[in-house]
C-alpha cells in the first residue's frame, strides 16, 4: 500500500524548492507554508486524512487567503469532511502521480527544436526552443533527496501537438537522474494526466483544494 502521508510530504518538499517558497511548518497531520502563490497567501497540505477537520479549523482561523490541499485515498469521504468543517471545494480534478524516472521513455526534440537545460539551487529548468529562439514548451523540477518534483509543465499554444510536452518531461527526467534523483512526483491537471500516463506515471490519489467560503480559484 502506498504511503500517501509520506508522499505528500515529499511532494511538498520538492515543490517548495521548485517555487522557492519558505520551508513548511509541521502543524501535526499537515504542513503550513507562507507560499505567496497565485490565488493564495498561505497553504496547508494535509498529510493525514484523519486530521482534516482540525486542519480546516486552522485554515478558517487564518487572516490571509488560505488553501487546504488534500491528497485523498477516499475522495468522497474527504470532500464531505471538508465541507462539514465549513470549507468549500475549489478544485478536485487533479491527481498526485509518481514514476521511476529511470523507466520513463526518452523523447528527442523534433526538428527544428532543441532543448536547453539549467540547474541552479536545486531547481532544474528546461525549455524547448525553435530555430528563432522562441520557447515552445517549458517546465521545471525541484530536487529533494532522491525525489524530483515536476512543476509548471506547459506548451505554448502555437507549438502544441508536436510532442513537446513529452520532450520536456524527458529532458527534465534525464537531468534529474544526473543529479541523483530516482523518483518523479507531480500534481497533474486533467489535461496533463493524459500526457503523464503515456510516459509511465501512475496516479496515487485524487487532489482536492478547499478554502474558506468566498475564496475564488484563479483562472
Image: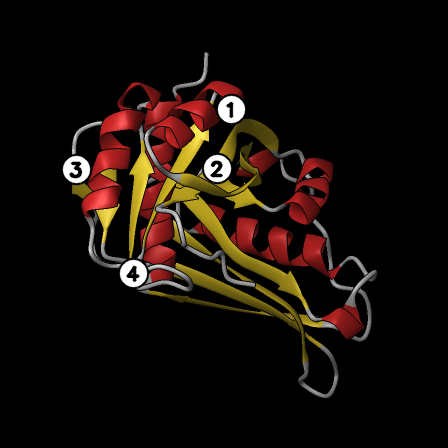
Which residue reaches farthest bottom? Answer: 132
Element type at mark 2: strand
Mark linked to residue 208: 2
Give the labeled residue for mark 4. 41
18 lies left or right of 194: left
Residue at image point 37% right, 33% down: 8
Neighbor class of circle 1 (other Cα within 10 Å; few <14, some 14-19, many 20+) is some
The reply to whether residue 92 is visible in this rendering is: yes
Indicate whether 212 appears above or below 151.
above
3D distance between C-alphas at marks 3 and 1: 23 Å
Give the labeled residue for mark 1. 75
Element type at mark 3: strand
3D distance between C-alphas at marks 2 and 3: 20 Å
Q: Residue 73's x, y, as percent?
A: 48, 20
The reply to whether residue 144 is visible in this rendering is: no
Neighbor class of circle 2 (other Cα within 10 Å; few <14, some 14-19, many 20+) is many
Cβ–Cβ under 8 Å for marks 4 and 3: no
Between discs 2 and 3, the one toward the N terminus: 3
Amino acid at each position: 500500500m502506498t504511503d500517501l502521508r509520506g508522499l505528500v510530504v515529499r511532494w511538498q518538499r520538492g515543490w517548495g524548492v521548485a517555487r522557492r517558497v519558505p520551508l513548511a511548518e509541521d502543524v501535526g497531520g499537515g504542513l503550513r507554508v507562507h507560499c505567496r502563490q497565485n490565488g493564495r497567501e498561505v497553504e496547508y497540505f494535509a498529510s493525514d486524512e484523519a486530521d482534516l477537520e482540525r486542519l480546516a479549523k486552522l485554515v478558517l482561523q487564518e487572516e490571509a487567503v488560505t488553501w487546504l490541499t488534500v491528497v485523498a485515498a477516499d475522495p468522497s469521504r474527504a470532500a464531505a469532511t471538508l465541507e462539514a468543517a465549513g470549507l468549500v471545494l475549489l478544485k478536485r480534478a487533479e491527481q498526485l502521480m509518481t514514476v521511476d524516472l529511470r523507466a520513463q521513455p526518452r523523447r528527442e526534440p523534433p526538428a527544428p527544436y532543441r532543448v536547453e537545460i539549467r540547474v541552479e539551487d536545486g531547481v532544474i529548468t528546461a525549455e524547448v526552443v525553435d530555430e528563432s529562439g522562441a520557447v515552445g514548451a517549458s517546465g521545471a523540477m525541484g530536487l529533494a533527496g532522491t525525489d524530483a518534483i515536476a512543476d509548471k509543465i506547459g506548451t505554448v499554444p502555437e507549438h502544441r501537438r508536436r510532442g513537446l510536452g513529452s520532450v520536456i518531461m524527458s529532458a527534465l527526467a534525464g537531468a534529474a537522474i544526473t543529479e541523483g534523483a530516482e523518483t518523479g512526483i507531480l500534481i497533474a491537471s486533467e489535461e496533463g494526466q493524459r500526457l503523464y500516463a503515456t510516459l509511465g506515471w501512475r496516479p496515487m490519489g485524487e487532489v482536492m483544494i478547499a478554502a474558506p467560503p468566498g475564496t475564488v480559484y484563479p483562472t
